[in-house]
Amino acid sequence: MFDPYGLALEKYDAIGQYRTTYLDGTLIDASATTETGIELEGLEGLANVVAGDPQFGACLAEKLLTYGLGRPVTVSDQPYLEQAQRDWLAGGDSPSIHRLINTLVLTEPFRLRRGEGSMGGQP
């Protein structure tokens, strides 16, 4: 079984350049159906499906915090992550990656993390 999300991005080659045909001239079909039966086509269709998933925001926030911390999110990080998600989605503004990153870097786990090789146990 092929990955429908990957098929939706088939019109972009390995370096992200847009194309409409393969090298042999065959037209590229970027339509796909997810395992739940949702039909999508191309980048716009994929974006709509992902943006419509209620778990997307929580997953994105957790992955960005994991990357920012340089380690997996722990149970003790969870309340800060949940508060950051609420702050990011509050206020009536459309959620943006910029605002999410700003919110995450203000969490205690990020601000008080200890770097490798820190001297004297100082953060």
Image (tube, helix red, strand yellow):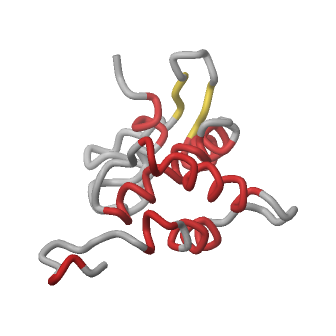
Residue 93: % across, % down: 82, 66
Q: How many marks?
A: 0
Picture quadrant where residue 94 is located: bottom right
Q: Is residue 109 left or right of residue 36?
A: left
**Residue 69 in which image quadrant:** bottom left
Using the image, determine if residue 29 lies above or below residue 71: above
Q: Which residue is drawn at 53% across and 22% down?
A: 34
* Camera-nearest residue between 56 and 81: 81
Q: Tell me what residue is drawn at x 60 percent, y 69 percent.
A: 103
Residue in the foreground of this view, choosing between 85 and 122 = 122
- Front residue of 31/111: it is 111
Specify the quadrant that holds the N terminus: top left
- Where residue 65 appears, as percent x and y from the top left, is 44, 58
Question: Which residue shows up at 36% across the image and 39% down it?
Answer: 26
- The C terminus lies in quadrant: bottom left
Q: How far across and how far down the image is residue 110, in percent?
A: 43, 68
Residue 14 higher or lower than 10, as above or below: below
Q: Which residue lies furthest to the front in this view?
A: 120
Side (left or right) of 72 relative to 97: left
Choose top left, top right, bottom left or bottom right for residue 55: top right
Seen in the image, is 91 located left or right of residue 20? right
- Residue shown at the point (17%, 82%) measured from the top left: 120
Answer left or right for 87 relative to 107.
right
109 or 26, which is in the foreground? 109
* Furthest residue toward right: 92
